[in-house]
């Protein structure tokens, strides 16, 4: 089995290594580069804890080979720190903090990267788009409510207003003829 | 989980990939998005000696109108199908089905060709392609051939594709925006269909109702004879052999197939 040389731009910095083709991108980031924000939860493409951006799009790095990322750009949560070098100097991480979108924090890097990718693809997120867009990210602590609020805030939305709209539309969809009782 | 070691090649053309497949025979396996293959390799249920990565071949990534049909490159990702403006007006069933596959991360990697080649009877796009009466174009060093979707899946995870062949293109009729629907039934977010039904122009494709994607032939015949939607949908499970698993029994799936077919036909009739 022949090793393969990879050049991967990680968080704006070119990295080079000779890797076994079977090396997963998640392991390349954590072990070869020492970037430990990216967590491995399920290792079966289910939980999303390992989500990073590959050329700007969210992917689960436990199911991408490092060789598949050769010549491409990867962004991990470490790469979100702004000029200050502080990882809270970023609209998504700041919104997670402000809205208390985490408890144990294990899912957080994956959530933050998934939300970052989601906003890049659709800057006009509503609550439904956030919930559907985070379908591939599991959180065992928060019940998702504050994560969804954080995503809405990061997209520049008022989470209270969005959640009211969604509650009404959800009630109309799931129980035809039943009023959401918002008084309007 | 770590796959068994393998060698890796990333040829820069379809011809280069075909040459590698011809040279290495059964030892070589093609990888497109890797979102069916890598999980299987991590479980060590597959241990190819050589991975031929076709995931970045631009020549396999396109969606274009070609006469009465839309031609889609086999390497087109679910995400590209989902967001294609051309498909939204020409064949809207496909983006609607692609949108139900996995989650955004999965759709950023998985490809149409990979989904068809993998041949999982629980997957969504094969049944849609079957209901569309699509044609699957295969290429090998021996040349190119077209296989109707109705003849492509031959058994569980088995297809009419030879080991030295690549799927290069999927050709689907331009249906326009009327007469289609997709009903996928799951109990959890981000899950495979327990049963799903694709309807387009009076043709009905079934997901997870047997060892391959299936057409609900009895329903289609009843519709052609002018029977009501309710009567036709009541025949949707005829001739199927649905599986048993933790999600449901065969009887449960039969019932789901009938109910989802009725719903899909009603939605399609209203479009
Ligand atoms: C968490 C998760 C959830 C998922 N949920 C769903 C779901 O809800 N519905 C669904 O339908 N699918 C689902 N999938 C499967 C997903 O759609 C896969 O991407 C798809 O089945 C395979 O596409 P791929 O490009 O990743 O193929 P790969 O994994 O690269 O390849 C799969 C097989 O096809 C062969 N192959 C690939 N491309 C070609 C080609 N052009 N010519 C010949 N052979 C080829 C490979 O050799 C391999 O045998 C899910 C996957 C994951 C990981
Ligand atoms: S660790 Fe990759 S999806 Fe769970
Ligand atoms: S905060 Fe604990 S898993 Fe999400």
Image: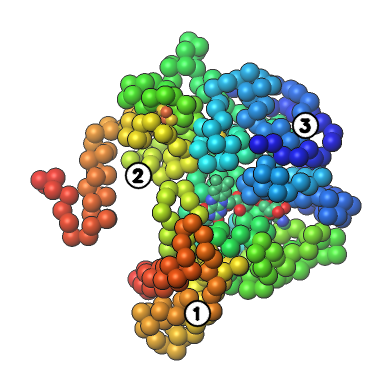
| Residue B127 image position (x, y, % from top left) | 55, 66
- What's the residue at 83%, 55% (across, down)? B26
Residue under pointer 2: A128
Chain ID at mark 3: A
In front: mark 3 or mark 2? 3
Asked if B16 appears above or below B222 in the picture, the reply is: above
The reply, left or right, for residue A168 in relation to residue A138 is left
Q: Are marks 3 and 1 on the same chain?
A: no
Report the number of numbered marks. Answer: 3
Of residues A145 and A43, the one nearer the viewer is A43
- What's the residue at 51%, 76% (across, down)? B216
Asked if A72 appears above or below A131 in the picture, the reply is: above
Using the image, tell me which numbered label, if any, was put on residue A20. 3
**Residue at the left extreme?**
A183
**Residue at the top extreme?**
A84
The picture quadrant where one finds residue A13 is top right
In terms of image quarters, where does ligand 3 lie? Answer: top left
Residues at marks 1 and 2, CA–CA distance in whole angstroms:
37 Å
Mark 2 residue CB less than 8 A from any atom of ligand 1: no
- What's the residue at 42%, 34% (across, down)? A139
In front: mark 1 or mark 2? 1
Q: Are marks 3 and 2 on the same chain?
A: yes
Asked if A40 appears above or below A179 in the picture, the reply is: above
**Residue at the right extreme?**
B23
Q: Residues within 10 Å of mark 2 (few under 14, many from 20)?
A: some
């Amino acid at each position: 089995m022949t090793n393969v040389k990879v050049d991967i731009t990680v968080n704006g910095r070119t990295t080079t290594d000779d890797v076994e083709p079977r090396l997963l991108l998640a392991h390349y980031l954590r072990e070869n580069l020492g970037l430990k924000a990216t967590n491995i939860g399920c290792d079966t493409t289910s939980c999303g804890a390992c989500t990073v951006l590959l050329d700007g799009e969210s992917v689960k790095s436990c199911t991408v080979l490092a060789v598949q990322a050769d010549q491409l750009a990867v962004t991990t949560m470490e790469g979100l720190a702004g000029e200050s070098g502080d990882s809270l100097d970023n609209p998504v991480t700041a919104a997670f903090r402000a809205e208390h979108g985490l408890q144990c924090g294990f899912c957080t890097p994956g959530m933050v990267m998934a939300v970052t990718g989601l906003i890049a693809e659709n800057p006009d997120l509503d609550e439904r788009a956030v919930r559907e867009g985070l379908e591939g990210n599991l959180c065992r602590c928060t019940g998702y409510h504050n994560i969804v609020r954080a995503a809405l805030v990061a997209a520049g939305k008022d989470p209270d207003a969005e959640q009211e709209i969604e509650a009404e539309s959800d009630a109309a969809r799931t129980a035809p003829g039943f009023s959401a009782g918002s008084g309007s | 989980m770590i796959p068994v070691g393998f060698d890796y090649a990333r040829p820069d053309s379809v011809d280069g990939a075909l040459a590698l497949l011809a040279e290495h025979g059964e030892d070589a396996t093609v990888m497109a998005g890797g979102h069916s293959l890598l999980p299987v390799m991590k479980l060590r249920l597959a241990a190819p000696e050589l991975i031929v990565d076709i995931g970045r071949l631009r020549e396999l990534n396109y969606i274009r109108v070609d006469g009465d049909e839309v031609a889609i490159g086999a390497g087109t990702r679910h995400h590209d199908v989902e967001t294609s403006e051309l498909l939204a007006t020409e064949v809207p069933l496909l983006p609607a089905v692609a949108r139900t596959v996995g989650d955004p991360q999965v759709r950023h990697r998985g490809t149409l060709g990979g989904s068809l080649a993998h041949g999982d009877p629980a997957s969504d796009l094969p049944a849609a392609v079957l209901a569309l009466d699509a044609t699957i174009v295969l290429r090998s060093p021996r040349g190119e051939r077209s296989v109707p979707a109705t003849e492509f899946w031959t058994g569980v995870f088995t297809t009419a594709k030879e080991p030295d062949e690549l799927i290069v293109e999927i050709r689907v009729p331009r249906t326009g925006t009327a007469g289609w629907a997709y009903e996928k039934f799951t109990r959890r977010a981000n899950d495979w269909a327990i049963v799903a039904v694709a309807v387009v122009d009076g043709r009905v494709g079934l997901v997870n109702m047997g060892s391959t994607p299936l057409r609900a032939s009895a329903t289609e015949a009843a519709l052609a004879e002018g029977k009501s939607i309710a009567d036709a949908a009541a025949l949707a499970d005829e001739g199927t052999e649905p599986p048993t698993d933790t999600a449901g029994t065969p009887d449960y799936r039969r019932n789901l197939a009938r109910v989802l077919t009725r719903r899909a036909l009603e939605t399609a009739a209203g479009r």
